[in-house]
Amino acid sequence: MEIYMIVHTYEKGGRSDACRETLLRNADKICVGKVLLLPIPTTRDNIHLKDSDTPLECVTKEADCDTLVIGYGMPRDFVRGLLQRDALVYDAASDESFLEKNAELTALATLGVLLTSEKRALGDLGFGIVGFGRIGRSLARMLMFHGAAVKIFTSRKATRLELADAGVSAVMSAKDADLSDVDIIIVEDIIDSGKTLSYL
């Protein structure tokens, strides 16, 4: 018996392509005829799909009882509308396993940018990481593995104490800190429901 599944993606790029291929390979395990694979994050304004003019209500109209909608950080009203149409909804923003893997990939990509753009060895550099969420933790671990000196800037006192116990420099704020030992500052920014890393 052949199993058919339609996967509709709303975003172009490697991550969406990889998700699409995984879904199609596992079509026999997913009991729906249609998957709507939304951007990551799904929206920046809670009205349109990220980086598009497509209103979220257009996605809702495409969903029915034979549809699985996969997104990231989907607004409650949007999810409610999908559920009212009997669609299955999976929000990766509530999946800790996905969030950890995504943080590792983001940190690895940042490490790749650093390795290809820096003329000095990472072990000869000092890094300041502002924000110690999943991405900051992954990146700090990778940089220290390469022998880099890492200083963490976090407002969480418990995190600073824990890092100090592990021998990692952690301070409250980059604003008043001594940055003489920091060559590159990496900032984990929260933009709407998505996270990005930028470095200075």
Image (tube, grey):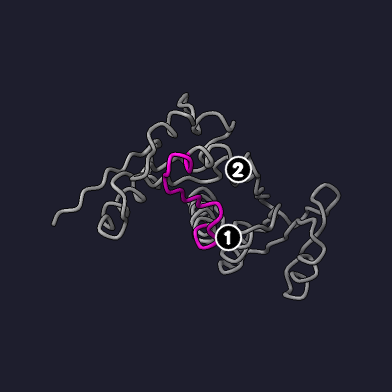
Dot 1 corresponds to which residue? Answer: 122
Residue range of the region highlighted in magenta in the rendering: 82-98
The reply, left or right, for residue 111 in relation to residue 165 is left
**Image quadrant occupied by the C terminus:** top right
Q: Find numbered disc 2 in the image and state the secondary structure of the residue it sits on.
A: loop
Crowding near the residue tagged with mark 2, few <14, some 14–19, many ≥20 C-alpha atoms within 10 Å: some
Rendering coords of residue 41 (x, y %): 52, 42
Q: Which residue is mark 2?
A: 193
**Which amino acid, mark 2?**
Ser
* Most distant residue in the bottom direction: 165
In the rendering, at what x and y percent does residue 135 appear? 59, 56
Quarter of image, res 43: top right
Residue at (82%, 63%) from the top-left corner?
157
Q: Position of residue 49 (x, y in %)?
A: 49, 32
Q: Amino acid at mark 1?
A: Leu
Could you tell me how many numbered marks the image carries? 2
Q: Residue at x 54, y 61 (%)?
A: 100
Point out the tag, 2 or 1, that comes first from the N-terminus: 1
The percent coordinates of residue 86 (x first, y second) are 42, 44
Does 152 lie within the magenta span?
no
Farthest residue toward the right? 176
Q: Which mark is residue 165?
A: none
Left or right of 161, for residue 48? left
Task: Decide: is 4 above or below 48.
Answer: below
Single out the residue that lies furthest toward the top: 53
Between 69 and 85, the one nearer to me in the picture: 85
Q: Nearer the viewer, mark 2 or mark 1?
A: 2
Q: Nearer the viewer, residue 112 or 89?
A: 89
Instruction: Say which residue appears at 51% left-offset and 39% top-offset.
Output: 42
